[in-house]
Image (spheres, rainbow, N blue to C red):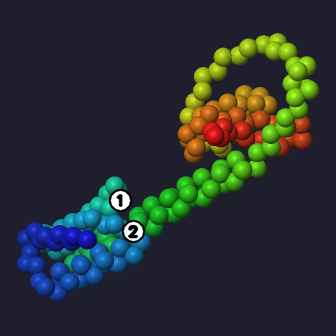
Amino acid sequence: MQVLISGRHMEMTEALQDYVKNKVERVSKYLENIKEADVTLSVEKYRHSAEVTIKANGITINGEEETDDMYCSIDRVMDKIERQVKKYKEKIRHKSRQQSKEKNLAQDVFITEDREEAKNVKIIKTKKLGIQYMSLDEAIKQMEVLGEDCFIFTNIASDSLSVIYRRKDDKLVLLEPEFQ
């Protein structure tokens, strides 16, 4: 990780630089692959401000704080950065859990094949549908809004055409293609 520290209207001491580097390195335990941390410290009259920009994994996290003490400003801005990083990590973790749930639901698919019943079925109506990209939860909500027992969509998680339908016992079944 590259830490760039610059000061405006102030003299950068070795102790201050070490303090900033230690605080920035503390964030690396929450966020891997930090490419660059840019820290700008400035003093204007009695206002001591610290501005931090961290770039990692394609995201940029910014924070700025201003107090009457430089060390306090650094502490506050780094606390703010840590909160943002934790929030980002929780968002990723939640998204991962949701995809895992969708995958588990897809594994609970039941397909029945009754060839004799299929011979007696005749098509009485043809419907043209606009297929949309959406998550499983969105598809279920859309199916309920439309009042249908069946819904076709392109699943974002698997990037394939999927069908969800409601069985007679009110349980939902997800059909996804498996290419062999």
Q: Contact (CB < 8 A) between labels 2 and 1?
A: yes
Secondary structure at numbered mark 2: loop
Q: Is residue 111 left or right of residue 50?
A: right
Tell me where residue 136 appears, x and y as whole percent: 65, 42
Tell me where residue 64 appears, x and y as whole percent: 28, 65
Q: Is residue 168 left or right of residue 134?
A: right
Figure quadrant of the C terminus: top right
Q: Residue at x 55, y 39 (%)?
A: 159
Mark closer to the chain start, 2 or 1: 2
Tell me where residue 57 appears, x and y as whole percent: 35, 59
Amino acid type, callout 1:
Asn
97 to 131, vertically: above or below: below
Mark yes or no: residue 123 visible: yes
Q: Which residue is mark 1?
A: 57
Residue 126 vs residue 86, the one in the foreground: 126
Residue 3 vs residue 96, the one in the foreground: 96
